[in-house]
């Protein structure tokens, strides 16, 4: 026999992972979807939860129908339902989590920037009248400050610090 449980969380009843929203939460989600100020991904999440809501409905949509209507996969629907059930409130469910670390660590750190600026302020190599971006790029790599860098990155560092090679 299937074990049936009820979890009451902030006015929402969930029985066997069936979502039943109260009127206040339903109105909040509907306002969120119709507002048009939010990320399309988050609006889709809210619409999926509204479609999964089973309270006071004569006919509930099947999972395949919801997936078709929202143009998402079954796995995405399951992930959205799981995230909603695990969220502490609707607000946390509808906000994107701020990434703690960037996807790729920046190559040019403050130390490398300082070395690029110091190189740009130093004496020009023999045979040249002034520093160029490409010359700076080659010198920085040659000195081992960084393994590789584009001349545009050198330009960005100089521009960031309001420095000119002229």
Image (cartoon, rainbow, N blue to C red):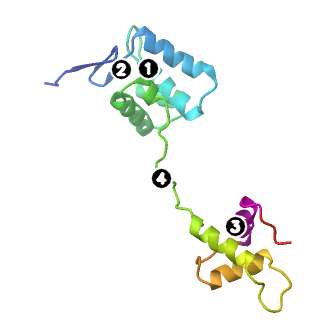
Residue 153 painted magenta = yes
Q: Quadrant of the C terminus?
A: bottom right
Where does the magenta region start and end? Answer: 151-162
Which of the two labelled residues, at mark 2 and mark 4, occupies the earlier sequence position?
2
Is label 4 in contact with label 1 (beta carbons under 8 Å)?
no
Would you say residue 85 is visible in this rendering? yes
Relative to residue 40, is residue 161 depicted above or below? Answer: below
Marks 4 and 1 sit apart, C-alpha to C-alpha, by 39 Å
Total count of labels: 4
Marks 2 and 4 sit apart, C-alpha to C-alpha, by 33 Å
Which of the two labelled residues, at mark 1 and mark 3, occupies the earlier sequence position?
1
x 43%, y 9%: residue: 23
- Name the residue nearer the viewer: 33 or 147: 147
Q: Which residue is mark 2?
A: 19
Marks 4 and 3 sit apart, C-alpha to C-alpha, by 21 Å
- Name the residue nearer the viewer: 65 or 154: 154
Q: Which residue is mark 4?
A: 101
Q: Residues within 10 Å of mark 2 (few under 14, many from 20)?
A: many
């Amino acid at each position: 026999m299937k074990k049936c449980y009820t979890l009451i969380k902030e006015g929402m009843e969930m029985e066997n992972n069936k979502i039943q929203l109260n009127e206040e939460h339903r109105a909040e989600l509907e306002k969120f979807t119709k507002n048009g100020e939010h990320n399309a991904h988050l609006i889709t999440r809210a619409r999926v939860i509204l479609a999964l809501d089973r309270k006071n409905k004569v006919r509930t949509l099947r999972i395949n129908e919801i997936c078709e209507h929202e143009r998402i996969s079954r796995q995405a629907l399951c992930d959205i339902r799981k995230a909603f059930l695990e969220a502490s409130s609707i607000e946390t469910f509808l906000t994107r989590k701020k990434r703690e670390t960037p996807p790729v660590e920046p190559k040019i750190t403050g130390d490398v920037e300082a070395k690029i600026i110091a190189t740009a302020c130093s004496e020009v190599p023999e045979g040249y009248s002034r520093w160029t971006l490409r010359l700076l790029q080659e010198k920085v790599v040659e000195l081992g400050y960084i393994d590789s860098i584009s001349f545009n990155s050198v330009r960005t560092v100089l521009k960031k610090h309001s420095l000119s090679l002229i």
